[in-house]
Every structure is written in structure tokens, then in C-alpha cells.
Image: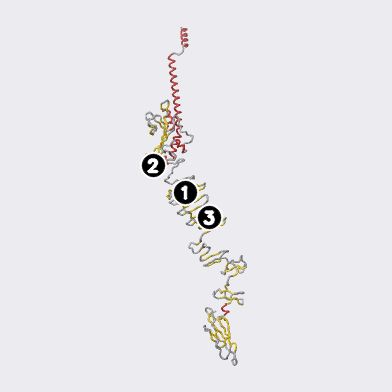
């Protein structure tokens, strides 16, 4: 019996698997193969979605950069230089604006053609800072897989990209949508079209400056900067209006590698100009002509209303020169005219003063330097004064008094004459070692001439000076016997001529002296 069982068992082992076992094996293998195929398809769609997202991001970013850079003209004039339709720029135009690099060809994975861009103003009809801007970037065509939209690849692409990405579905083929936005499909009712959408907010993102921003910041409050601020071109302040349009009232600019500062009036006329290259600072009139220029070399130049040089300070080497038509004090009571004339009430020279031509002084000249008479001096023509104010001149290298010296009557002397220091009208002369009055020494009489006269001769009156009286004196010179002796006769009636009368002897002669008598010494 046991032998029969072993034989049956051996026959079964040699006969192979049963039909049921084969069917089960094939089923399991089929399930495994389907799983593997689906896994491969899923991974392939993942890679496709990743490629779509990666390849599309540069164009998505280009739309954002374009909007940031040209937000001001887009929301005001609606024009951008170099773009035919500013709200629908092309890939070629963005490359020309250096927003897209030259390496980008415009092609994208899984579709033929180039992406398109579309901007919208929100709300419609808005202007300036009140506008939000919608930025849509569109795939050139649907993403397909074997004639059907590749939804799994599109789903992977949207997940890879983020909430800004979406696509059109079979339920809403005319709309590209994401979890929180939807917009019209630019290709119409076409399934599987990938696209992005983001808004540039006037109340949000638009309030912030970004790198390479071309907008006017238009700060409404004070701005505090903790560090240095470097400006490539110009810093301006205020706005004015002139004949050529508007201007900045104050500017700090870079010109040719040097700084410049310009300040303008409200009518845009530049009134103050500073140049860092030359060091010049210039003020200008209301018409723009120069008035005063301070040079980098230390010179100062003043200009007349006609623009010609009128006054200033200039240097020749290290020597400075002040030039002007006239120099005067604030009240014009003293100064120097254009011809070189000095005018004023007092001119004071504290040291050696040299004049190369004639000088006319209508006031007083004070010599501050004091010297002593008889001491050596430097050069002929120099003047000084003694301590008592007496004027000295340098003659033959010795200081000499000019004019008559002043002395008191009775003071000691050696020679010469002087003026009485106590009586300015009295003249002194040296006699016997002391000064005596010339008037006292000469007396009140001054004899002019003499002549011989006889009885009946007429003597004319002499010409006398002011304050004196004509005088005649008769001195007998010949007497005849028996007359003995004679008398001297005087006449000083103050009127002439006089008739001579000699009595007591016939034919007598006399000498007539004519002179003048002064009332005081």
C-alpha cells in the first residue's frame, strides 16, 4: 500500500504545475507589471511636470521684472520704449530690454511655440499709484500625452511651481485656474494649457523699492539713512519751472568724475554753482550772468552787471593783488580812486612810505615814526618827526629839521632863528647864546631910503606895509653963520608928500630919511 502511494506521488511531481497554479501566477505577474508600468508612467509625468515648471520659470520672472521696471509708464502714459504693445510684450522685446538673457530662445518643454505675456490694469481705467497690475504668463499650447491632456504632468508642474501656477481642465477648458485664482484661457476652450498669474499691488508690493527699480520713490516723510548713500548720477531737491520747462532747484551731481553743486531760483536760473574739479564757487545774477567767483587758487573775482571783471583778488605766484575801480570806507569819507588819488580827512603812515609820483593831500598827514635830529637816516627824501612833532627830512643821510624850529624866548641857542613856541606870530633869533625876539631887536621903525633936501623941497610918501604909518625924518647937514647948532625934526602924520621948510639960515641943506613906523613890536 505504501508502495502505491510513493508511486502516485512520484507521478505528480513529474507532471508539473496544475492549470490553477499557472493562472494564479499569471494574474499575480500581471498585477505586478501593471503596477510597475503605472509607476514608470507616474515618474515620467513627474519628470515632465518638473521640466515644465523649471523651463517656464524664467518667463514667469521676466513678466515680474518687466512690470517692476516699467510700472510708472505702464500706469501713466501706457507706453514703453521698444515695446509695440506694452501690456503684451514679446519674448524678443524682453530680450532687447535685457530683461530676458540672450540665451533664452523662447522654447518651453512639451509644447511648440513661445510663451506669451499679458498685463491688466486693476481696476480697469485706473492711473498711477492707484493701479494694481495683473501679470499672466501663458504656455504656447496644451501639454499632451498620447492625444490627451497630460493632467498628471500638469499637476506635478503646478505643485513644483506653487500657487501662482495653474492649468485649464476638461471641466473648464476656457479658464486657467489655481486654488485661489482663475483667468481666461488666451487659447480659448483648450484643455491642458499651463500658465501663471500674479498681481503687483499698489497698496502692497508697489510700495516697496526693489533692486534696479526705475520708479520715483516719492517718499512722503523724512528718510533716515544710517550709513553712506552713493548716487551714480544726480541728487535733486525741489521743482521749479523756467523757460525751458521744469528743473530741480538743488542738485548734487557727478560730472566728469568730479562733484558739482547747483542751486537754482524758482524760475530755474542757476544762481550758485560749485565745481569740484576746479574748486570754483560762483554766484550768478537773476539772469544767470556771473557776479562773484571764488577760485580754487584763492582768487576772488567780482563782475559788473555787463559781465566784465570789475574787482577782486588775484595771485601772481605767491604775491596777491587787490584790484578795484575805487576803494573806500563804508561812509565814503576816505578811500582811493581809480586814478590813484587818496582822499579822506587823515592819512597815517606808520613806516617807510614811498610815492613814485605827485600826491595831493587835502586833509592832514600824520607821521607816526619818530627820529632825532642829527642822527643818521637811510635815504634822501624820507620824512619823519621828532617826539615834539617837528618835521624831519633825510638830507645827506642825516635827519634835519624842516622849516624853523620852535623855541621859547630866552632859551639857549647856538645859532640861527626860530619861531616862538608860546607866541606863534613872534620870530626869535639867536643873540649872545639865547633866543631873543626879532621884533624887540628891530624896534618899531623901519627906514627905507634917504635924500638931500633944501627949504621948499617936496618929499613923496613911502609905500609902507599893512599896519604901519609913513614916516619922514629931517637931519640938518649944513648950517650957515651965524646959526650955531640945529635940531632934528620928525614928521609922522601918516600922509605925504611932505614939503621941507628950513628956517634960520638961507641956503641950508638937510637929509630926509623916509621910513615906516609900526604900532607894535
Residue at the disc numbered 3: 299
Residue at the far bottom: name it.
482
Is mark 2 in CB contact (under 8 Å) with mark 1? no
Front-most of 82 and 521?
82
The answer to whether residue 1 is above or below residue 458 is above
Label 3: few (<14), some (14–19) or many (≥20) C-alpha neighbours in 10 Å: some
Is there a contact, CB below 8 Å, between mark 3 and mark 2? no
Is residue 399 depicted above or below 214 in this figure? below
Q: Position of residue 274 (x, y in %)?
A: 49, 51
Q: CA distance from mark 3 to mark 2?
A: 54 Å
Residue labelled with disc 2 = 127
Indicate the secondary structure of the residue bearing disc 3. loop
Counting residues from the N terminus, which is met first, the one under dot 3 or under dot 1?
A: 1
What residue appears at the point 52 percent right and 53 percent down from the top-left corner? 295
- Residue 106 percent across, percent down from the top left: 46, 33
Q: What residue sits right under mark 1 in the picture?
A: 251
In screen coordinates, is 118 left or right of 443? left
Q: Position of residue 500 (x, y in %)?
A: 55, 87
Closer to the N terminus: mark 3 or mark 2?
2
Amino acid at each position: 500500500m505504501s508502495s502505491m502511494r510513493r508511486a502516485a506521488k512520484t507521478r505528480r511531481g513529474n507532471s508539473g504545475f496544475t492549470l490553477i497554479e499557472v493562472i494564479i501566477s499569471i494574474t499575480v505577474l500581471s498585477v505586478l507589471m501593471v503596477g510597475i508600468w503605472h509607476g514608470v508612467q507616474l515618474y515620467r509625468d513627474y519628470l515632465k511636470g518638473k521640466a515644465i515648471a523649471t523651463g517656464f520659470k524664467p518667463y514667469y520672472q521676466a513678466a515680474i521684472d518687466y512690470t517692476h521696471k516699467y510700472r510708472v509708464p505702464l500706469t501713466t502714459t501706457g507706453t514703453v520704449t521698444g515695446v509695440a504693445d506694452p501690456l503684451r510684450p514679446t519674448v524678443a522685446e524682453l530680450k532687447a530690454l535685457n530683461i530676458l538673457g540672450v540665451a533664452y530662445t523662447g522654447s518651453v518643454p512639451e509644447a511648440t511655440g513661445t510663451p506669451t505675456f499679458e498685463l491688466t490694469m486693476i481696476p480697469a481705467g485706473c492711473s498711477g499709484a492707484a493701479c494694481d497690475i495683473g501679470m499672466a504668463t501663458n504656455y504656447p499650447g496644451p501639454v499632451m500625452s498620447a492625444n490627451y491632456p497630460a493632467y498628471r504632468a500638469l499637476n506635478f508642474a503646478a505643485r513644483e511651481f506653487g500657487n501662482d501656477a495653474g492649468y485649464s481642465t476638461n471641466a473648464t477648458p476656457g479658464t486657467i485656474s489655481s486654488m485661489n485664482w482663475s483667468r481666461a484661457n488666451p487659447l480659448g476652450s483648450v484643455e491642458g494649457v499651463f500658465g501663471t498669474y500674479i498681481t503687483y499691488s499698489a497698496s502692497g508690493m508697489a510700495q516697496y523699492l526693489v533692486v534696479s527699480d526705475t520708479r520715483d520713490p516719492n517718499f512722503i516723510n523724512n528718510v533716515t539713512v544710517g550709513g553712506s548713500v552713493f548716487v551714480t548720477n544726480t541728487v535733486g531737491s525741489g521743482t521749479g519751472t523756467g523757460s525751458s520747462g521744469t528743473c530741480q532747484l538743488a542738485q548734487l551731481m557727478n560730472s566728469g568724475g568730479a562733484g558739482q553743486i547747483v542751486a537754482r531760483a524758482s524760475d530755474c536760473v542757476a544762481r550758485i554753482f560749485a565745481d569740484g574739479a576746479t574748486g570754483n564757487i560762483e554766484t550768478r545774477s537773476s539772469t544767470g550772468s556771473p557776479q562773484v567767483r571764488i577760485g580754487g587758487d584763492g582768487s576772488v573775482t567780482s563782475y559788473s552787471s555787463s559781465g566784465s571783471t570789475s574787482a577782486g583778488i588775484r595771485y601772481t605766484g605767491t604775491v596777491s593783488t587787490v584790484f578795484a575801480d575805487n576803494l573806500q570806507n563804508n561812509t565814503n569819507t576816505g578811500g582811493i580812486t581809480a586814478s590813484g588819488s587818496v582822499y579822506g580827512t587823515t592819512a597815517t603812515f606808520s613806516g617807510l612810505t614811498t610815492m613814485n609820483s605827485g600826491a595831493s593831500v587835502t586833509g592832514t598827514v600824520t607821521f607816526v615814526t619818530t627820529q632825532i635830529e642829527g642822527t643818521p637816516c637811510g635815504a634822501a627824501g624820507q620824512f619823519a618827526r621828532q617826539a615834539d612833532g617837528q618835521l624831519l627830512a633825510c638830507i645827506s643821510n642825516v635827519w634835519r629839521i624842516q622849516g624853523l624850529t620852535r623855541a621859547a624866548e630866552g632859551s639857549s641857542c647856538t645859532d640861527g632863528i626860530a619861531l616862538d613856541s608860546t607866541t606863534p606870530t613872534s620870530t626869535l633869533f639867536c643873540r649872545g647864546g639865547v633866543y631873543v625876539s626879532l621884533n624887540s631887536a628891530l624896534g618899531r621903525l623901519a627906514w627905507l631910503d634917504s635924500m638931500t633936501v633944501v627949504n621948499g623941497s617936496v618929499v613923496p610918501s613911502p609905500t609902507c606895509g599893512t599896519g604901519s604909518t609913513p614916516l619922514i625924518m629931517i637931519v640938518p647937514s649944513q648950517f650957515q653963520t651965524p646959526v650955531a647948532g640945529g635940531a632934528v625934526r620928525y614928521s609922522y602924520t601918516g600922509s605925504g608928500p611932505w614939503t621941507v621948510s628950513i628956517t634960520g639960515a638961507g641956503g641950508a641943506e638937510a637929509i630926509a630919511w623916509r621910513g615906516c613906523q609900526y604900532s607894535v613890536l
